Image: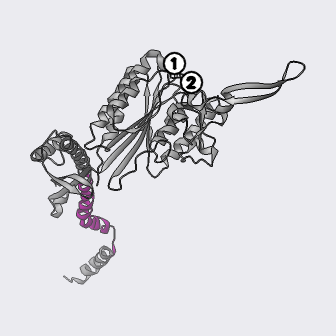
Amino acid sequence: MSRLPLVSRIAPQLARFAAAEQGNIAVIFAIALLPVLTFVGAAVDYSRAVQARSSMQAALDSTALMVSKDLSSGTITTSQISTKAQDYFKALFTATNALPSVSVAATYTASTSMGSTIQVTGTGTYTTTFMKVAGFPTLDVGADSTSAWGLVRMRVALVLDNTGSMAQDGKMAAMQTAAKSLVDQLSALAKTSGDVYISIVPFAKDVNVGSSNYSKYWVDFSDWDAANGTGTCNSWNSWGQCASSTWTPANRNTWTGCVVDRDQDYDIKNTTPTSGNVGTLFPAEQYSYCNTGSSSYLQPIMPLSYDWSSLKSRIDNMKPTGNTNQGIGLAWGWMTLSTGDPMNAPAKDTNYTYKDAIVILSDGLNTQNRWYSNASQIDARQKKLCDNAKAQPSNITIYTVQVNTGSDPTSSVLQYCASGADKFYLVTKADQTVSVFKDIGTSLSKLRVAR
């Protein structure tokens, strides 16, 4: 039998098979499937390893801070650092499924350019699920954290509401207890004199800068002289009216120490006063609650100090008096942190880093200042003041506390002035003040993560 007809019949079929492309995609897909799955699996493994490392970093940061605090406070010795670091890390680390075994080491260095340091290092091994197909059965995961202390100093102005409404619901007593506890909490951080300074600024409508300053150039007595003194008639006309008179100002040593807001815009700045510029001076006022003989005596400002006993005594002596002017309290809190007259904060040592803060507590909304009796206008000035304070190179942190035991609205200006949402506290019961001030103290005393 001739094979030619068979070949002639098969040849066209072979030609069609050679030209067919329908099966190529399946072949290509089969060839590419393994590397595609490998890449996808690698992404999954890598993502899980990164998440585990992030958890490790967070735990190491907290561990470094806690060990540093323990060591600096004397709770542990240098020989206990490694064991304590491992214990803290074990309690804090959450990604144990991804990294079941992490090796933690801690190194203490007593003196560096950053001060004393603790460096905590963590290393672990992540077992891959997909990458092992490509020959990578594990991934090394590591992180470290360093905390530093000893070169950071703190200055805190406590701006405390002494207005009449603080007499209600036990608010004044709660604030006094809380403020004294904060003094104790912060003073415990000081290892040497000057590590921590605190000032006290009681405020109502005015602040009391101390009657002993009556001869200081930075007090403006223009309005006070006109309002305080005696008038003498020199001659009388035929109708029995005084034709000419002489006004004799009172002796300035009878001034009881209160001042009102400065001229605008110095009322929202910490400009050092100069005798040739009356706008920079502080106008004296014979405020009824600034009377040393009164049972409602607005206490004088206490400049930055580390005399802890005197600071707490000043807090104990505070009494609720008058209307609310948060702005003047904040302005003077800022002044206590500023060098130069009138509060003369000690110069800062260039060998240290400084953390400046203002803590203001008020139980009400603004009611009166030198210029306005309208809350919205007073608030507007206060917001500008807070903007200026927070924009300073010293990077002042402002904590604000509203004690609202009644039906007042939440203070928008105190929320605005706070250096972040977590720096504003709303207290609805007086006894909450102590825990709030403790939280603020903890925030202030946190040792910084250096890197």
Question: Foreground residue, 274 or 432?
Answer: 274
Vertical order, 129 against 239 (above or below): below
In the image, is residue 369 above or below residue 142?
Answer: above
Kindly report which numbered mark, 1 or 2, lies closer to the viewer in this rendering: 1
- What percent of the width, then of the height, locates residue 432? 37, 23
**Residue wearing tag 1:** 294
Q: CA distance from mark 1 to mark 2?
A: 16 Å
The quadrant in which the N terminus is found is: bottom left
Residue drawn at x 75%, y 29% as measured from the top left: 246
Q: Which residues are magenta?
A: 19-48
Residue beneath the point at 48% across and 50% down: 392
Q: Secondary structure at mark 2?
A: loop
> Residue at 27% across / 77% down in the picture?
10
Residue furthest front in the image: 234
Examine the structure image and report whether residue 42 is included in the region drawn in magenta: yes
Q: Which class describes the residues within 10 Å of circle 2: few (<14), some (14-19), or many (20+)?
A: many
Per the image, label 1 sits on a secondary structure element best described as loop
Q: Which quadrant holds residue 12?
A: bottom left
Chain-order first, disc 1 or disc 2: 1
Q: Position of residue 328 (x, y in %)?
A: 54, 35
Inspect this view and state whether residue 247 appears: yes
Give the amino acid type for the residue marked by disc 1 in the picture.
Ser
Q: Determine which of the numbered discs, if any, sits on residue 323 in the image.
A: 2
Across and down, in percent, residue 136 comes to 16, 61
